[in-house]
Amino acid sequence: MSKFIKSAKKEVPQMSTSSMPDIVFMLIFFFMITTTMRQADPLVRTTVPEASQVEKLERKSLVSYIYIGPPSNKKLGNESRIQLNDSFKTLDDIPDFIMMEREARDEVDRKLITTSIKADQTVRMGIVTDVKQQLREVGAFKISYSARKTAHE
Amino acid sequence: MQIKRKAKKKVPPINASSMADISFLLLAFFLMTTTMDVDTGIARRLPPPVPPQEDIPDIKERNILAVSINKNDWVMVNNKPMDVRMLKEEAKNFLSNPFNSPDLPEKRMDTIPALGGLYEVSKGVISLKNDRGTSYDMYIRVQDELTKAVNELRDELSKKEFGVPFTSLKEETKIEAIKRAIPIAISEAEPEEY
């Protein structure tokens, strides 16, 4: 059975590292795809309030954001403004905005769209109530009040 | 002739060993810039708009917990001022009515198979009302306390029935059953026109 006799002193071949770049590139592509760049530059300050009972927002692609807060640019005063996408908007623009958001999604997913209200903690409820009324009228019933998880507990 | 070229010079192979380093550098960049921050928030469902001439359903007084916040962020519960921190206990007591007190909400029988047939679901509704001048921070705090009350009641029921907290439940039927037994009964008042 000499077939199985190992030749003594076989040299260990060098490990080939040529596939390393491929592996790393694969990882890069994964991160590049999963990285979600922030779509809108914030024009309003939104330090969201803290809450203990927060839930995660599922499926980020189905979330549309409404920002409410005082303008970041101090020259524009202190009154709370609404920001949709990339610019200041008024209450009357919300129905159009919701329609656009719906158009952008697949038909099956349209019912699952959540509107996240990112409002600054100093904002008064008046403007938030107005936004909510607009959302009700246009049929965007799923909402989420954006809040941070309380640090302790 | 020194500049005379040699014919057929071999092209040296490109050294690809630095490729890995370059791609690692890129990888590190994306790893660092990727923000895995999860957006969190308090989820709510808005009611559909009501037609103006619609009758407001009559709800018995004992079935309502009227929570109102004024423009100075003071909280009133059933016309009595209350600290926000007390709100959770009040809401829990209201929604569960442990001793079937006549001042607290009635219950209706509902068939929930996963909870072993009939279950007494509270008819109580928390009515939340706020002023236009209420701060958003306070509003969220109140919403948070009310959510906490509901979540704790759900947890208690889940522990009693299935032995695990509500958040650890995996089966959809059980989750649905608990949600049906203890609904988020928070109703927001229609804003008044000024």
Image (spheres, coloured by chain):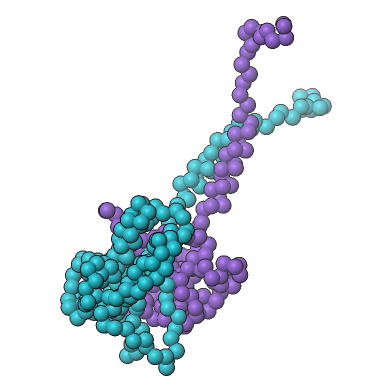
Toward the viewer: A42 or B174?
B174
Residue B10: x and y, percent? 76, 27
- Residue drawn at x 52%, y 68% is A112
B191 lies above or below B33? below
Toward the viewer: A87 or A5?
A5
Residue A21: x and y, percent? 60, 36
Question: On the picture, is B75 further left or further right than A89?
Answer: left
Residue B98 in view here:
yes
- Residue drawn at x 49%, y 61% is A60
Residue A50's image quarter? Answer: bottom left
Image quarter where the N terminus of chain A lies is top right
Residue B39 in view here:
no
Toward the viewer: A88 or B164?
B164
Residue A74's image quarter? Answer: bottom left
Residue B129: x and y, percent? 29, 79
- Residue drawn at x 66%, y 9% is A6
Who's purple, chain-wise? A
Toward the viewer: B94 or B15?
B94
Residue at the limit of the structure toward the front, as seen here: B117
Residue B109: x and y, percent? 37, 72
Total numbered labels placed on residues in the image: 0
Residue A51's image quarter? Answer: bottom left
B119 lies above or below B15? below
Residue at the limit of the structure toward the right, as seen here: B7
- Residue drawn at x 42%, y 76% is B46
A60 lies above or below B27? below
Who's cyan, chain-wise? B
